[in-house]
Image (cartoon, grey):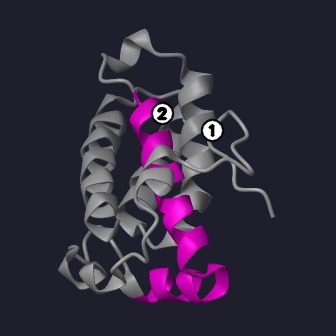
Amino acid sequence: MAIKKYPEDLSGAKSELYERDHVTPDFALRDSVSRDIFDPEIFEELRELFGEDRTRLALEELSSCLQDSFPNVAPEDLDREQIFRRAHFLVARAGLMGFTALRDTCVDLQHACAKGSPFGKEYSRTLETTTATRNAIASLL
C-alpha cells in the first residue's frame, strides 16, 4: 500500500528525519498528547497494523502535508475547491491515525466549503488544530 502526501506521491521515499535518525520511536510519549487532539487507542491500532517504521513514516508525511495544506492567509484569498479537496484528503488520514480534532475541524471546513457559505471561522479553527497536531506529531516522533 503506497502512502501518499497531498498531492505528490511519496511512496518508496524515506524522509530526511527517517534517514538521519532511524531509531525505534518511543510511542510511550503518546500519553503526553492531549486527548482533545489525539486518541491513543486508534493510534495503537494503526501502529499494530503498520508496524513502528511505517507508522513513523506516516506521521512524518502527515506533518509535512499539514505544513503545506493550509496557508496562513485570509480565507477569501483562497480557492474554495482546493481547500475543500485538502480538507477532504485529511479527514480520512487524520482519523485513521487518531488525530480526531484535526479530522473534526477538517469535516467542518469541508462542509462549509461545499455549502458555499463563508468558511473563515472553520478555516481558522483548522489552522489552530493543524498547529496542535504538528506539535503532537513532533512529540510522537
Q: CA distance from mark 1 to mark 2?
A: 8 Å
Judge the density around disc 2: few (<14), some (14-19), many (≥20) Cα neighbours within 10 Å. Answer: many
Tell which of 134 and 36 is nearer to you.
134
Q: Residue at x 57, y 37 (%)?
A: 86
Determine whether 60 is above or below 125 in the image. Answer: below
The image quarter containing residue 96 is bottom right
Q: Amino acid at mark 2?
A: Ser
Give the left or right position of residue 101, taking residue 88 as reference.
Answer: left
Q: Amino acid at mark 1?
A: Tyr
Tell which of 38 and 76 is nearer to you.
38
Magenta span main SS: helix
The tag earlier along the polypeptide, 1 or 2, is 1
Q: Measured from the top left, where is residue 78 in percent x and y?
A: 46, 16
Q: Residue furthest right?
A: 1
Q: Is residue 93 visible?
A: yes
Magenta segment, which residues?
41-70
Q: Which residue is mark 2?
A: 69
Q: Which residue is mark 1?
A: 6
Q: Secondary structure at mark 2?
A: helix
Q: Residue at x 34, y 61 (%)?
A: 137
Q: Measured from the top left, where is residue 97 in percent x and y?
A: 51, 70
Q: Residue at x 25, y 71 (%)?
A: 36
- Residue 48 is a magenta residue: yes
Q: Measured from the top left, where is residue 85 in percent x and y?
A: 63, 36
Q: Secondary structure at mark 1?
A: loop
